[in-house]
Amino acid sequence: MKVSNKKEDFLQESLKLIHEKGFKATTMRDIAERMNFDVSNSYNYIKSKHEILEGFLFGTSAEFHSAMDNVLSSSYSPDEKLKQIISSHITIASTKPFEVALMVNEWRNLKEPKYTEYIKLRDSYEEKLGSLLLEGIEMGVFKAFDITIAKSVILSSLRWFYDSYATNNPNINPIELERQIVSFLFKGFLE
Amino acid sequence: MKVSNKKEDFLQESLKLIHEKGFKATTMRDIAERMNFDVSNSYNYIKSKHEILEGFLFGTSAEFHSAMDNVLSSSYSPDEKLKQIISSHITIASTKPFEVALMVNEWRNLKEPKYTEYIKLRDSYEEKLGSLLLEGIEMGVFKAFDITIAKSVILSSLRWFYDSYATNNPNINPIELERQIVSFLFKGFLE
DNA sequence: TTTTTATATCAACAATTGTTTATGTTTGAA
DNA sequence: TTCAAACATAAACAATTGTTGATATAAAAA
């Protein structure tokens, strides 16, 4: 069993650099410099620059989908399911903040056909959440809000805290974060 | 009084192109092609490519600050002030969706010292909101939540709907949008 | 030992980029 | 009519980019 893998090192360093400077602004020479070898050597580990981005985006997307699917196929009630989804968002963002940062900021840099493929995954994820909200509304657990607006509000409420884990700031306690966000979304902040 | 201004046309076309392709992916030749003139002619209207981005970002930022300052210095109660802030976000996003899109997606492309300057404006805006939340909590109008988390949840809840106005989609009715978002944030969506 | 496999460098490529310089034309005001 | 401002092009620049090919060495497997 390997203790360290040079390709994995290369990808992790790429990930951090792309997070710091953005995908377009990060050059292959930048990455190679951090790895202390020549640019050309990078191509012993990857086929192209875009392959790096695609790997992370589709990999992390699959994690989100997997978590969502597990929750939806459980026997929890809609509000409990929503709690679970919030929880899995926080778990993924706190353990893989750089990967999530790429999902939030760099997906526009995908090239066709990967771009369209990725959009479809995103839409599919949103639809899954939409179906849960609809179910909750029909069961009288959630208020009868516009599904599209509700979906967007919930997802954007979950799209910011990766940053706290990507920086060296004093991290937000994930447990407390979950408690507060659930409370916010469920009951609002009016006293 | 001028009916049409060529520089303004140039900037608007730049704005749309940057929104479509991203700042880095948009070349000066792309913009010139849309204007049906040569690249070099662009430099009769602007000093540099970055000047375009800076103009829109700082201009729209000033609008947000202005709206925020007017609200804060009014005699409304904290919850009414928050409603006003939400309202002004929707107004700006629905009338200037491309400018807001640039604020959301392209601020990372600013160069120093504009970059740091912009971050300061952003932080200052967040602090203004934070002070309002604190005031509301102390007055017992808002629940005693973590200010940092509350700030982030509120602002990210307001950071998605520009997209509906930037595309040709059937637009979301701004009045109804405001009603739903206020209801969400104030009372949550648990029945 | 022999032979892959992993790791590395050097040199060069074709294309693209933002920007400048020099120069020309059109237009509207004086 | 004169003249300056606005509007336009052609040509070139220096730098940067992702990627390839040829080649070399070190490590691991056979």
Image (tube, coloured by chain):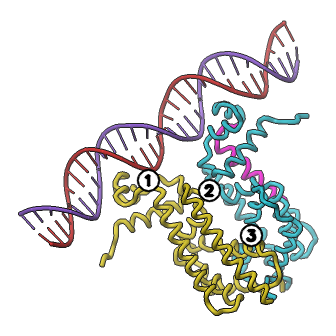
Chain colours: A cyan, B yellow, C red, D purple
Q: Are the numbered discs 2 and 1 placed on the same chain, yes or no?
A: no
Magenta part of the chain: A46-66
**Badge 2: residue crowd in 10 Å (few <14, some 14–19, many ≥20):** some
Left or right: B124, with A9 as reference point: left
Q: Are the numbered discs 2 and 3 placed on the same chain, yes or no?
A: yes
The reply to whether dot 2 and dot 3 touch (C-beta < 8 Å) is no
Residue A94 lies in the magenta stretch: no
Residue A80 coordinates in the image, percent (x, y): 90, 74
Find disc 3 in the rendering and name its residue: A155
Answer yes or no: is residue B89 visible. Answer: yes
- The quadrant of the image that shows the N terminus of chain B is bottom left
**Badge 1: residue crowd in 10 Å (few <14, some 14–19, many ≥20):** some
Q: Amino acid at mark 2?
A: Arg
Q: What's the CA distance linking mark 2 and mark 3?
A: 18 Å
Residue under the image location 78 percent in, 35 percent down:
A6
Residue under the image location 74 percent in, 39 percent down:
A10
| A190 is higher (above) or lower (below) than A164 | below
Find disc 2 in the rendering and name its residue: A108
Q: Amino acid at mark 3?
A: Leu
Find disc 1 in the rendering and name its residue: B28
Q: What's the CA distance linking mark 2 and mark 1?
A: 20 Å
Q: Are the numbered discs 3 and 1 placed on the same chain, yes or no?
A: no
